[in-house]
Amino acid sequence: MKKEKKGEILISIIMPVYNNERYFPYAVRSVLGQELDDRYSIELIIVDDGSTDRTPEIADQFASKDDRVKVIHQENQWIYASFNNGIEEANGKYIYILNSDDKLYAHTLKYLQEKIREYHEPDIVFTRIVVCACDDEQNVFKTWNLGDPGLAAEIKENYYNSAEDVRENWLYFKKCGLISSQANLYKRELALKHPFRTEFYAADAIYNMEIAGDVNDCLTLNKDVYMHLLYGREDMNAATGKYYGNEHAMWNELFLLSKRVYSGWGILDFQHMEAIKTERIAWLCYELSTITSGACKLTLEEKIRVIFQEEIDDIIMECFGNERREELDSRLLCSAKELFFQEEPDRNSPVFFAFELVEALFHFESNHEDLMRIKKGVYHTDNPWHIGERFYERLEKNCLFSID
């Protein structure tokens, strides 16, 4: 017998899916196995993003057996377009997004309903994500909370009852990992007002900063709701560790957006500015790790060009400042060294200057030849930010010979 919807739809769960016939049924069952009380119902909107496996068929089978399931079939548009399309079709008071290879903990939807009612329908209910390292069969062998380990573990149930209260605590929410993803309960009108950006893979982090100014109250919960399954297989967790090519622009945009939001609220003090800078530096390190990863499809010359010509800009310089310039150069040069360890360029390569710079710096023997190689690399036209200049100046000062 087909299961029927009952009562007003309180929560619409949006589930984007693409070619995930193996795991997506588990995600669906983690939702459909839950119910609200007799006055309310849930709605599961499966957005099939042009799958070519059995995913569309499986989705339709779920819909044929349960009135709470709605399926959208679309040409491939990527995940954030699927979010937006699902939200536009939603009828619930609240929106919750669940990825097709993750799951909800049992009984959490009824728990969320109770909290929505208890706190008079806040604009956002922040839900804690538990990262679960698992094998192919979803057997979990390690768990941890998203965000700062200490803060995330100590999140308490707390209601922030005004826009001012929300803004004063936004940085705390960020440090706890609550606004790093889309796994929160959003009022539908709030979600509709701010569509997800579709050009960036971390559009959820940008999304939460974009909606921040319209949040008048919110609730944090200390109960685990969302189970993010981190599979060991390389073909799962597709966005993790992948190089897209627009990461630098994406994280720069988040940096500038965060500054604008905090400045607009009148709270862009030293603490907030340092937090924004620290986050941007962390993402720079992540960018470099994706470039040096064996999964990166760029050629050696393309990778070195990105490191020497694109990874430094005015925003990165603002984050490090002159006092940390050596640290910045060290990170970039170490990344280049790692690439050259994997593959050496020939002498005619346009990145041979970088190879000689790295070799001379890391194997400096206090001779005139090494110092000349370093100088040539530092002031090469394809090294516009003169990466390595601080090291060159110190080495030149300590040398007993002139290289004029």
Image (cartoon, rainbow, N blue to C red):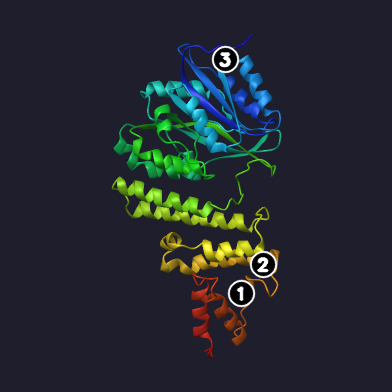
Q: Amino acid at mark 1?
A: Phe
The part of the image, by quadrant, that contains residue 151 is: top left
Q: Nearer the viewer, residue 91 or 9?
A: 91
Q: Disc 1 and disc 2: Cα gap in Å?
A: 12 Å
State the residue position of label 2: 340
The part of the image, by quadrant, that contains residue 105 is: top right
Residue 157 in view, yes or no: no
State the residue position of label 3: 67
State the residue position of label 1: 353
| Among the two numbered marks 3 and 1 on one chain, the one whose residue lies closer to the N terminus | 3
Q: Residue at x 69, y 44 (%)?
A: 234
Q: Nearer the viewer, residue 50 or 279?
A: 50
Residue 326 position, x and y percent, is 49, 69
Q: Disc 3 and disc 1: Cα gap in Å?
A: 65 Å
Q: Quadrant of the N terminus?
A: top right
Residue 330 in view, yes or no: yes
Residue 181 position, x and y percent, is 50, 39
Q: Amino acid at mark 3?
A: Asp
Q: Disc 2 and disc 3: Cα gap in Å?
A: 58 Å
Residue 143 position, x and y percent, is 59, 39
Q: Amino acid at mark 2?
A: Phe
Seen from this angle, which residue lies furthest top? 1
| Among the two numbered marks 2 and 3 on one chain, the one whose residue lies closer to the N terminus | 3
Relative horizontal placement of residue 214, taking residue 366 as reference (left or right): left
Relative horizontal placement of residue 143, taking residue 190 as reference (left or right): right
